[in-house]
Structure formats: structure tokens, C-alpha cells
Image: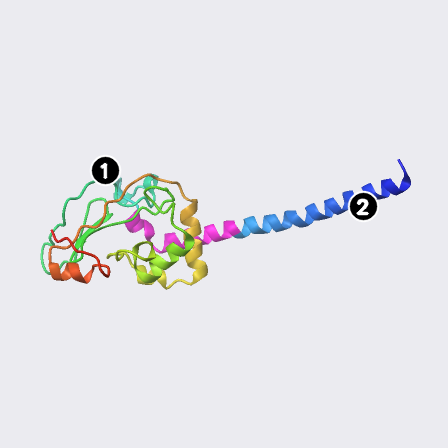
Amino acid sequence: MSKQYSVVIILGAALMLAAASWMKPAANSEAGAAAARVARGGYLVTIGGCNDCHTPLKMGPKGPEPDMSRMLSGHPESFPIAGGAAAPSAAWLMTMAASGTAFSGPWGVSFAANLTPDDNTGLGIWTEDMFVKAVRTGRHMGVSRPILPPMPWPNVGAMNDDDLKAVYAYLRSIQRIHNRVPEPLPPSSPAVAANHAAPGEDVAVQ
């Protein structure tokens, strides 16, 4: 092997090592940033009380508590609700199902959505843009029916872009749970139903 050829090999190896040493910190930096974003999203979901409505309740030793084996999977499809429950008096605005995931009020009956990344029943097919647009506009998937009470979408939508994207990243990271949440039930009053309809949407009044 010639001396010149040996020098070429040594230089090539040195360049490869230099490139690898440069790429590794960059990859580690990207992975660290992604993990930090997911962690930030988990923190926001926790302090924002998302589990209060989107995680079904179970009976614990001290009373109802979130069933974290079904975390953020929304109203259970195994718990069908055919209609709303009237408030006991004018002092009550709404009633809540035993699961803590369905709510009856002047808007009809609303069901907490499945926020897990399941493709068929959760947010699996939602893009980041769709998620941000939904909580900014109060429209399902950002374009369709209104997001109904008690979902505090104006508060969630007030987050800055980085925080909303962090929440989205966290929701993409959690366990997928196949659970098909029912569509909202309309209110009994035609006037109220019309107020909650999307533009051009026909309202079926029960």
C-alpha cells in the first residue's frame, strides 16, 4: 500500500468520525427537544384538568376517581345514553352522567371526546393544524360542528402556539384506546338547537 493511499484512507476515516460526532449531538438535541415538548404537553393536560371530563370515572375507596386505564378515552361506548336528563330545578344548569363523561343541558347532551391517538375513534387522523384550529375556533376538526359545553375551548385556545403543539404532541404519545364516542344529542328546544347548529346544518330536534 502506497504512503499516499494510506494518507487518503486516514483522512477519510477522520472525516467520517467528525461527521458522526457532529450528527450524534444534533440527533440527541432533536430527540431531547421532542421529549421536552411531550413532557410540557403532559404537564398542561394535567393542570388543565383534561382528565376531569375525558377520563371515565370509576368507584374508588374514597368515592369516584378517574379510571386511568382508560385515560382520556372519552365517554365509554359501553355506556349508551339515549337522551338528556332534566335538571332538578332552575338552580341547576346541567346534569352529569355517572361516568363523568356525558353532560345534559340547554345545548342537548354532549359527550367527552376520545383524545387518544386511536386512528378510528380518537385523534389518530388529526393533524397538528386541525387540532390547533379546533380549539381556536370551537369547531370539531376545526371546520364542522360546534364543540359543546362544558368543554372550555376558549380557555384552551388561548394557549400560545408552542403550548398547543405540546399538548398535541403529548396526546399523540399516550396509549391508543379504541372507544367510539357517540355523537352529541340535540336539545329539545328548536330555538336552542338552531343556535348551536353549524352554518347550513340541518337540525334534528328530538
Query: Looking at the picture, which amino acid does disc 1 mark?
Result: Ser
| Residue at image mark 2 | 11
Residue at image point 18% right, 56% down: 202
Q: Residues within 10 Å of mark 1 (few under 14, many from 20)?
A: few
Q: Residues within 10 Å of mark 2 (few under 14, many from 20)?
A: few
Camera-nearest label, 2 or 1:
2
* Quadrant housing the N terminus: top right
Residue 90 figure quarter: bottom left
Percent of width and height locating residue 162:
46, 59
Residue at image point 60% right, 48% down: 27
Give the SS element for disc 1.
loop
Please state which of residues 60 and 200 is positioned toward the viewer in this rendering.
Answer: 200
- In the rendered view, does 109 fall on the left or right side of 158? left
The magenta span reads 34-54
Q: Is residue 164 above or below residue 183?
A: below
Please state which of residues 106 and 59 is positioned toward the viewer in this rendering.
Answer: 106
Give the SS element for disc 2.
helix
Query: Looking at the picture, which amino acid does disc 2 mark?
Result: Leu
Residue at image point 41% right, 56% down: 129
Residue at image point 43% right, 58% down: 163
